[in-house]
Image (cartoon, rainbow, N blue to C red):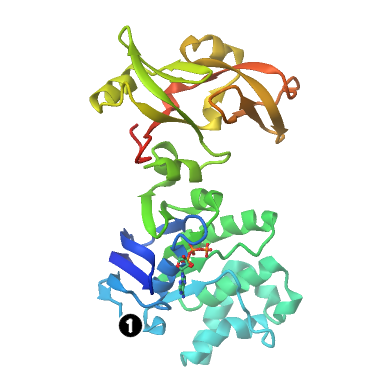
């Protein structure tokens, strides 16, 4: 069993606390993604698991074994980095065999493992080539191969795709996911790319300033973000945040901001009353995909319509991003079906899908609902 358990783990570099109270159990065979902006502590966390960084406080278990003081080579893990650093003078076979040779594996066993990994990664025909004669994607596959031959309990990957071009990145994403299913091992994967996190992770840990903001499945993080940071970080284009006030009139709860007044659905209104938010200033959140321009939707949602001016219309082919002015004092983004008449300057009528709205506490930025 290869679950990885971090028990209230801290990492301090002098005055800087890079990781604070990281507390999480990663399940056997799970694909866990650590995601967050630059400097949030995700690499440091991974390096502590790898044994490349000492743990300042807390415990780290791999399986049932406390490994705080176990050297990297004895942790039964393999790490794949962003810079895959293949040995230039060795061919692919030798690159993949090198780690096993160092560990004094028998020649036949090394051969068996290298050929099996090459088959899984579809690089059998490249075994005699030197790294300089490989494409970026092929090199990345060799780097993965080097990790696979070790047959580790846990794979650690630190932005392994960030040196590849966009198209190859998408392709390798799928390949790594397939590889994970096939090898049935635990993977801990670091990225700053929220799309990578959403598409690859069984579970995502969103970090900021060394602190876990939320650890949950991609759909849970998308639908029920824990706070404004997670809500804004996951999803593209990002969620719209509108400052305003909740108030009650004739038994209904409304959200009001400059240029906007929308009715909160009954169930949500009840919760907001119970939590004491009616009459208060709040932040209203709505994802661009939950703003609609289809006439049928708009006509049937009289309590959540608004008018706005199209400032910029970006046609992405299958969809269109509208950047709208007229609400509060910043642009609101809507993701709609492409139409020709969205020229800049035109006035449009749209409606929110209020069942998908979010409310955040203005001071703490935590999710209210
Ligand atoms: P990136 O995506 O840019 O790699 P990250 O989320 O992986 O960022 P870390 O590399 O873990 O972030 O760094 C977390 C914090 O710890 C940063 O503030 C960084 O400056 C600091 N840090 C990392 N390594 C050291 C070190 N060896 N000495 C001092 N501070 C460090």
Residue 210 location, quadrant: bottom left
Q: Mark 1 packing: few (<14 Cα in 10 Å), some, or many (20+)?
A: few
- Which residue in the protein does label 1 denote? 70
- The residue at the point 49 percent across, 46 percent down is 233
Q: Position of residue 203 (x, y in %)?
A: 40, 52
- Side of 322 relative to 268 (left or right): right
Q: Residue 347: image x %, image y %?
A: 67, 16
Q: Indicate left or right for 286 with 316 as reference.
A: left
Above or below, comparing residue 99 to residue 191 in the picture: below
Instruction: State the SS at label 1.
Output: loop
Question: Residue placed at 43% from the left, 69% from the top?
Answer: 44
Q: Which residue appears farthest toward the top when viewing the image? A: 250
Q: Residue at position x 39%, y 38% from top?
A: 224
In the displayed structure, 310 sits above or below 219; it is above
Total labels: the figure holds: 1
Is 99 situated above or below 253? below
Q: Is residue 267 left or right of residue 167?
A: left
Residue 87 location (% of width, % of height): 64, 84
Residue at (35% x, 17% y) in the render: 247
Q: Which of the 4 quarters of the picture holds residue 267?
A: top left
Of 303 and 284, which appears nearest the observer? 284
Quadrant of the image for the N terminus? bottom left
Q: Which of the 4 image quarters holds residue 55?
A: bottom left
Q: Quadrant of the C terminus?
A: top left
- Does mark 1's beta carbon lie closer than 8 Å to ligand 1? no
Whether residue 314 is visible here, answered yes or no, is yes
Q: Residue 301 at what x, y percent from top left?
A: 49, 12
Q: Can see residue 1? A: no
């Amino acid at each position: 069993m290869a679950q990885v358990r971090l028990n209230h783990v801290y990492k301090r570099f002098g005055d800087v606390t890079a990781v604070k109270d990281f507390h999480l159990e990663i399940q056997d065979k799970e694909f866990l993604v650590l995601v967050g902006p630059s400097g949030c502590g995700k690499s440091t966390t991974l390096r502590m698991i790898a044994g490349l960084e000492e743990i300042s406080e807390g415990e780290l278990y791999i399986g049932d074994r406390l490994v705080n003081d176990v050297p990297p080579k004895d942790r039964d893990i393999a790490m794949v980095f962003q810079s895959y650093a293949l040995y230039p003078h060795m061919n692919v076979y030798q690159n993949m065999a090198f780690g096993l040779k160092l560990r004094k594996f028998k020649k036949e066993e090394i051969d068996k493992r290298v050929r099996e990994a090459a088959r899984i990664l579809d690089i059998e025909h490249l075994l005699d080539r030197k790294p300089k004669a490989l494409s970026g994607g092929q090199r990345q596959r060799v780097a993965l191969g080097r990790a696979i031959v070790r047959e580790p309990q846990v794979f650690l990957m630190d932005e392994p795709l960030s040196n590849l071009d966009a198209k190859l990145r998408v392709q390798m994403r799928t390949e790594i996911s397939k590889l994970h299913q096939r090898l049935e091992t635990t993977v801990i994967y670091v990225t700053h790319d929220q799309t990578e996190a959403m598409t690859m992770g069984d579970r995502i840990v969103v970090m900021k300033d060394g602190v876990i903001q939320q650890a949950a499945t991609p759909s849970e993080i998308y639908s029920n973000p824990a706070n404004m940071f997670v809500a804004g970080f996951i999803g593209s284009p990002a969620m719209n945040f509108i400052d305003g006030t909740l108030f009650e009139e004739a038994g209904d709860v409304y959200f009001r901001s400059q240029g906007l007044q929308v009715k909160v659905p009954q169930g949500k209104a009840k919760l907001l009353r119970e939590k004491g938010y009616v009459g208060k200033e709040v932040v209203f959140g709505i994802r661009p995909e939950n703003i609609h321009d289809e006439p049928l939707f708009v006509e049937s949602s009289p309590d959540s319509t608004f008018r706005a001016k199209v400032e910029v219309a970006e046609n992405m082919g299958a969809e269109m991003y509208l950047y709208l002015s007229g609400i509060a004092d910043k642009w609101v983004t809507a993701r709609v079906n492409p139409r020709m008449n969205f020229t800049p300057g035109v006035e449009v009528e749209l409606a929110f899908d209020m069942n998908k709205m979010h409310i955040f506490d203005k001071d703490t930025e935590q999710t209210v609902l």
